Image: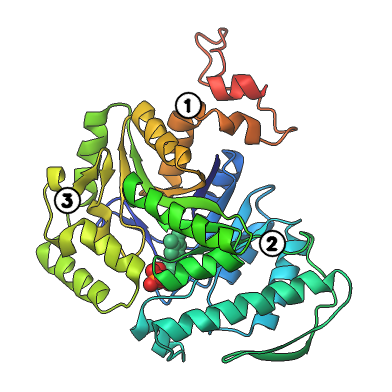
């Protein structure tokens, strides 16, 4: 199990849908979240893209020097830059970070936003452009190890003699992650990416997506890995976790939900539509209706675009739900919670000890000696918690 956290470059808060309890997301804060994720042994962090976000490359670059082994899953959106430039940026970042770059290929599903960025293609054509982009990106990086150049003539992208003089550390190139729920997205994933990501749909739906992408990939003689993007609300008891889920949306009013749902309805993203269906376009508001499968709560999506579901429960329950997804063939879990700094700690402290693979995936050499827990009576050292004890 690879467990990633999230850098909240479009804001962070204790409550959704209001500025009450919000905190400023600035360099100090994102450094704190990244350093927390790094020192807690998360495998990486997802950094999103979009006009609501700070630019992911600038953000990721600002975090290289303050982290040691954390990997950066940086979103790249075709249409915003030429693939040769994206390849050059990837190679530079990979070298400067010691091989810690991962790429999230983001086709984009908000046409209003895309037009603002100068990208006017419809859904089908956007996927053609995405496919051409990732082909060129991949070839330019792969060939850089042998000093070779690349020519390509597509419908939307053409390059002649595209060449990188300085290859990335990862060979042939940093792994490519990608999410999208349309047929075109599944087809692209089957042919061109290393890991397919889904937003947190119920296990039965995720199983269908995995089966479809897998079957398509097999036709090309390929295998694809799978991951899921979920929020988490973990507390020591189920009751506390559900109370905090309610609290998170306690300041959301009907007008805000209506505005958010209207914006989602204007997008042509199949993934976003599937998220909206989970809470029936904002009309489900009671806890029992929003719990769309055991411990999977669709409340976040009432106002948040993209990942709109959270696993809610005590540590054992949430660990078991994660294992359920793992049993479907998923090995990458991209998680987050509000606020992102405190919840990075809470999740790691409460749930990591219950995830057996966390022990194996911790790098050797990061043996933690404590202090763990305050010394009792200035003399008695509490024993280390299970995860650290096993690492030591
Ligand atoms: C895990 C994950 C992360 C995503 N990150 C972003 C993002 O940072 N910015 C964005 O605009 N879209 C993001 N998306 C949306 C997809 O990239 C895709 O553009 C969208 O779902 C539309 O494709 P579809 O119609 O095939 O579902 C993400 C999707 C997933 C599953």
Which residue in the protein does label 1 denote? 354
- Residue found 40% across the figure and 87% down from its top: 122
Question: Which comes sooner in the sequence, label 1 or label 3?
Answer: 3
Disc 3, disc 2: CB below 8 Å?
no
Q: Position of residue 213 (x, y in %)?
A: 48, 59
Using the image as rendered, state which of residue 213 and residue 64 is in the foreground: 213
Q: Which of 266/31 is in front?
A: 266
Distance in Å between CA atoms under marks 3 and 2? 41 Å
Residue 16 picture location, percent across and down: 26, 57
User: Where does residue 372 sit, x and y in percent of width and height?
Assistant: 55, 22
Horizontal and vertical percent position of residue 157: 62, 89
Q: Which residue is mark 2?
A: 174
Total marks shown come to 3
Measure the C-alpha gap from mark 1 to mark 2: 30 Å
Q: Does residue 59 show up?
A: no
Position of residue 116 relative to residue 26, above or below, is below
- Badge 1, how many Cα within 10 Å: few under 14, some, many 20+? some
Q: Is residue 36 above or below residue 94?
A: above
Q: Is tag 1's residue or tag 2's residue first in the polypeptide sequence?
A: 2
- Residue occupying the point 49% across, 51% down: 227
Q: Which residue is mark 3?
A: 250
Which comes before the other along the chain, label 3 or label 2?
A: 2
């Amino acid at each position: 199990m690879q467990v990633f956290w999230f850098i909240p470059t479009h804001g962070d808060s204790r409550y959704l849908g209001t500025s009450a309890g919000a905190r400023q997301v600035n360099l100090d804060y994102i450094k704190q979240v990244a350093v927390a994720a790094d020192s807690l042994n998360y495998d990486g962090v997802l950094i999103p893209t979009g006009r609501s976000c700070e630019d992911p490359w600038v953000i990721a670059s600002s975090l290289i020097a303050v982290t040691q082994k954390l990997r950066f899953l940086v979103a790249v959106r075709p249409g915003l830059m030429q693939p040769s430039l994206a390849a050059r940026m990837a190679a530079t970042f990979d070298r400067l970070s010691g091989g810690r770059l991962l790429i999230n290929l983001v086709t984009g599903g908000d046409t209003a936003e895309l037009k603002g960025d100068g990208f006017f293609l419809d859904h089908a054509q956007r996927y053609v452009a995405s496919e051409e982009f990732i082909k060129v990106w991949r070839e330019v990086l792969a060939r850089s190890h042998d000093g070779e150049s690349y020519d390509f003539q597509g419908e939307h992208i053409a390059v002649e003699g595209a060449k990188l003089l300085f290859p990335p550390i990862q060979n042939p190139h940093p792994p490519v992650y990608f999410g999208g729920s349309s047929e075109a997205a599944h087809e692209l994933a089957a042919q061109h990416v290393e890991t397919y990501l889904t937003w947190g749909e119920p296990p039965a739906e995720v199983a269908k997506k995995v089966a479809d992408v897998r079957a398509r990939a097999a036709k090309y003689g390929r295998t694809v890995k799978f991951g899921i993007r979920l929020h988490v609300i973990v507390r020591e008891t189920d009751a506390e976790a559900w109370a905090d889920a309610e609290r998170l949306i306690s300041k959301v009013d009907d007008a805000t939900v209506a505005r958010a749902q209207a914006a989602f309805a204007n997008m042509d993203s199949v993934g976003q539509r599937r998220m909206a269906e989970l809470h029936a376009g904002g009309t489900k508001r009671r806890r029992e209706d929003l719990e769309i499968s055991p411990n999977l709560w669709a409340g976040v999506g009432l106002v948040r675009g993209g990942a709109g579901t959270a696993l809610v429960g005590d540590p054992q329950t949430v660990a078991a739900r994660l294992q359920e997804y793992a049993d479907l063939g998923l090995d990458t879990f991209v998680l987050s919670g509000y606020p992102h700094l405190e919840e990075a700690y809470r999740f790691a402290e409460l749930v990591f000890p219950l995830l057996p693979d966390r022990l194996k995936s911790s790098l050797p050499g990061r043996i933690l000696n404590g202090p763990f827990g305050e010394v009792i009576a200035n003399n008695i050292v509490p024993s280390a918690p299970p995860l650290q004890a096993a690492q030591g």
